[in-house]
Amino acid sequence: GAGVSQSPRYKVAKRGQDVALRCDPISGHVSLFWYQQALGQGPEFLTYFQNEAQLDKSGLPSDRFFAERPEGSVSTLKIQRTQQEDSAVYLCASSFSGTDIYGYTFGSGTRLTVV
Amino acid sequence: AQRVTQPEKLLSVFKGAPVELKCNYSYSGSPELFWYVQYSRQRLQLLLRHISRESIKGFTADLNKGETSFHLKKPFAQEEDSAMYYCALSETGGYQKVTFGTGTKLQVIP
């Protein structure tokens, strides 16, 4: 596609519910990143994929968070047993390579609200 | 650990006035610095990066390693510059995991 596509755009989950957020990167982009942006804050790194390999998951806040990119294209961020503190915008970004001179291309994000 | 500080949450300037958005960083190595911008209802997008040494939409930013700063400047603000601006840092090379500041909202008053 022409850009990074994320779905759903908005998600309301009851506390304790599991959610899955999807990211379709730009075709051919090797690198894929997930970020979490809480209200009034800048994006914070969650995890990084190079093709299907998850090379860095140091930013995942707890073992309730899990990300995958099984075929090196679409990625899913899963949050189990959601808590109110998980409420945030989840951003996906991709780049042709880790050293892309054009920087990341971001998706529009998924706004997760846990009630 | 790498850290980016943007001291101003909101900066209001009149149209035609100079703009300076402040950014300071801490990083033990040799970082790469960026400014990202998010216009209303749009995606976060790269504005400029220090290694390019270019002016984008009239904005420039100079990396000052002595002061560990990367302030964003524009001599004459335009209404269309109103947006959220994020300063960001990554390691040179590698896969460029980026650390963002908390952002400054620039409001240009007509």
Image (tube, coloured by chain):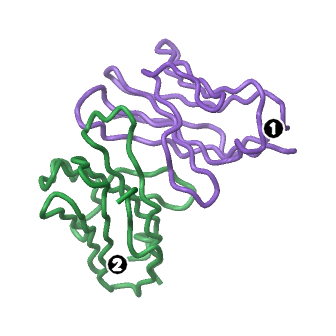
Chain colours: A green, B purple
Mark 1 vs mark 2, CA separation in Å? 41 Å
Residue nearer the viewer, B44 or A44:
B44
Q: Chain of mark 1?
A: B
Q: Tell me if residue B29 comes above or below residue B10 in the rendering.
A: above
Q: Classify the position of the N terminus of chain B by image quarter.
A: top left
Name the residue located 24 percent from the left edge and 39 percent from the top edge.
A97
User: Residue B4 location, x and y as percent?
Assistant: 47, 35
Q: Chain of mark 2?
A: A
Neighbour tally class for label 2: few under 14, some 14-19, many 20 plus, Cα within 10 Å: many
User: Residue A29 location, x and y as percent?
Assistant: 26, 49
Determine which residue is flagged by label 2.
A82
Name the residue located 41 percent from the left edge and 76 percent from the top edge.
A8
User: Residue B98 location, x and y as percent?
Assistant: 36, 40
In this image, A54 relative to B62: left or right?
Answer: left
Determine which residue is flagged by label 1.
B13
Marks 1,2: beta carbons within 8 A: no
